[in-house]
Structure formats: structure tokens, C-alpha cells
Amino acid sequence: MKERWQAVLVIAGLVCLSFMMPLVGLLSSAALGLVVLRQGLPAAATVLALSAAAVAVFGGVVLGSVAAPLIYALLLWFPTAVAAWVLRISRRIEWALASVVVPALMAVLAVYGLIGDPSEFWNEKLIRLVQPLLDQAPDGLDADGARFGLRVAAHYATGFVSAGSALSVFLTLMLARWWQSLLYNPGGFRAEFVELRPAPAFAYAALACIGGAMSLPAVAELLWNLGVVFFVLYLMVGVAVIHVLLSRRSAGKFWLAGFYLLLFVIPQVALPVALMGFTDVWMDWRHRRAAGV
């Protein structure tokens, strides 16, 4: 936030570091998101162009390739920058979330429209990735069972990849918004996040996907993959609801820490959390609890 070149150093430097530590790339996206949120698109475009040039130089000198690291960096930065721009102009976190979820849904539709059999495509990729491990597996490992599991996972890989991408973009955006709040508006991020509530149209679309997946076998796989993206959407909403409900208890920070630990250790907890976020459209858990209903 002090100087343009400092921003370029952080954003480009973190991307370069992410080739050794992949998760560090998310911090680079969050840093760019902070520039967009605070300075707007013109300043962010300049920072992005200079950062891209720095990554290209790094790729050419260190990695021996300019195109691959540059494409990787742009794919990492661009979605977060767009979501941050939407949040900046709208000042509504649910619109920013929609700007992340809608492209993920469109990506699923595009894959099924452009690839004849996405599950076969993903099965080949997964087998190619895992086969060296299966070849070196101990005698007790059921290799055929592992391949069967990969074939099942391949049917939903499109949805998981799209949903995972959407989740990472939204988390980097939230990190950028949190940084902005710490710098310029202490406490503002929490007040904004706990009121996260997407448009009801998303809930009805999710219901249509679930109903269609159970009653229309011809398009069931496509609809289940779309459903995975909706799951991530309402997982984020559910987390916001949980924040509100637990913050009203004594030692609320302790309960929140326990909730995140439980979510990390037992991922199945995400299912009831997403269900709470989904039903909040009709039940309005946050305000019902506040009113004692």
C-alpha cells in the first residue's frame, strides 16, 4: 500500500516462491486483491503488468520458460482481481461470491459441452498420475480397488476442480478484505462476512440440480458436478452462520477455534455446515436465533 514497486515485489516474489511452496501463491493473489480493493483497477492493472513482466523474467532466467510461469501467474491473479473489483464497486460480499461461483458453474457446463466424456478424460489423467505409485505399492495394496475408486472419482472430478478453484479464489479475496479491514476499517470485515447471504435464485438452482440429478439419468453426472459447486457456495454461507451463532456464546472465540479445528480434522462436518448455509435462505438462522425464535 506504500509504493507500487513494493506491491510488485510482494506479488511477483510470492508467485516465484510458489514454484517451491505452492500455497504461497494464494498470498500473491490476496496481495493483488488488496491493491484492487484499495486502489481500483487502473493502479491494479499497472501493478499486475509489472508483476507479470517480473514473473516472465524469472521464468526465462530460472525456469527456462517464459510462457508457462506467466500463464500460471495470470490464472492465479485474474479471478481474484475480478472478484475484488466486483466487491469494490458493489460493496456487497454476496455479489463478489457470485462472481466466483457463476464462472465455476459455467466452467462445468463448458467442460461437458466441449469434451464428449469428461469422466474418461479425468480417469486417464488420474491413472497416469497414480500409476507410478501403484507400480511401487506393497503387495497388500488392492491396486484394482484403487483404480475402481479413481474411476468413480473421475465422474465428479470436473465439479471438484471447479469448486476447489472457486473456493481458493474466494478465500484469497476474503484474506485481501481482511487485510484491508485491519489497515483501514478495523472490525469491518467481520461485520461484512457474517451477513453473507447469496440471492435466493442460487438456492432454487441448487434444488433444481439435485432434483434433476435424481430423476434424469441422462444428465445426472453433469448436474451432480454442478451440485459440487453449489456445495462450496453454501459451505461458505454456513461458515458465516456458524460465526454468528457461536459468537453469541460465552467464550465465543474458543468455540470458533474448536469449530475450525473440527472442520479440518473431520471434513465430513462440512456437510451439515453447508446444509445450514443452504437452509438459511428460508430459515434465516442468524436472525431467528437473535430473536430467540
Image (tube, grey):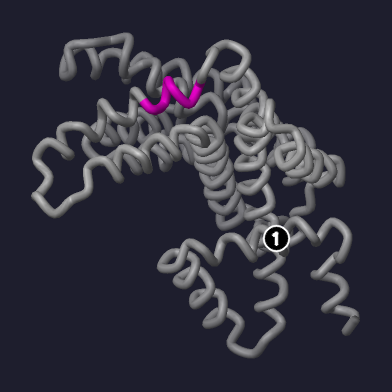
Q: Is residue 80 magenta?
A: no
Q: Position of residue 52 (x, y in %)?
A: 40, 17
Q: Is residue 122 magenta?
A: yes
Residue 135: quarter of image? top left
Question: 55 above or below 290?
Answer: above
Residue 188 in view (yes/no):
no
Callout 1 amino acid: Leu
Residue placed at 29% from the left, 29% from the top?
Answer: 127
Residue 256 in view (yes/no):
yes
Residue placed at 26% from the left, 40% from the top?
Answer: 144
Q: Position of residue 176 (x, y in %)?
A: 55, 45
Residue placed at 64% from the left, 38% from the top?
Answer: 224
Residue placed at 76% from the left, 39% from the top?
Answer: 215
Task: Count neighbours of disc 1 (C-alpha within 10 A) and say few if under 14, some if 14 to 19, many if 20 or more.
Answer: some
In this rendering, the count of numbered labels is 1
SS class of the residue under badge 1?
helix
Q: Position of residue 236 (x, y in %)?
A: 64, 54
The quarter of the image holding the C terminus is bottom right
- The residue range painted magenta reads 118-123
**Frontmost residue, 284 versus 88:** 284
Question: 266 above or below 15?
Answer: below
- Horizontally, residue 124 falls left or right of residue 83, namely left
Instruction: Give the residue furthest to the bottom.
Output: 250
Residue behind mark 1: 275
**Frontmost residue, 131 versus 175:** 131
Q: Position of residue 157 (x, y in %)?
A: 48, 34
Q: Chief secondary structure of the magenta span?
A: helix
- Horizontally, residue 46 falls left or right of residue 15, namely right
Question: 101 above or below 239?
Answer: above
Question: 289 above or below 202?
Answer: below
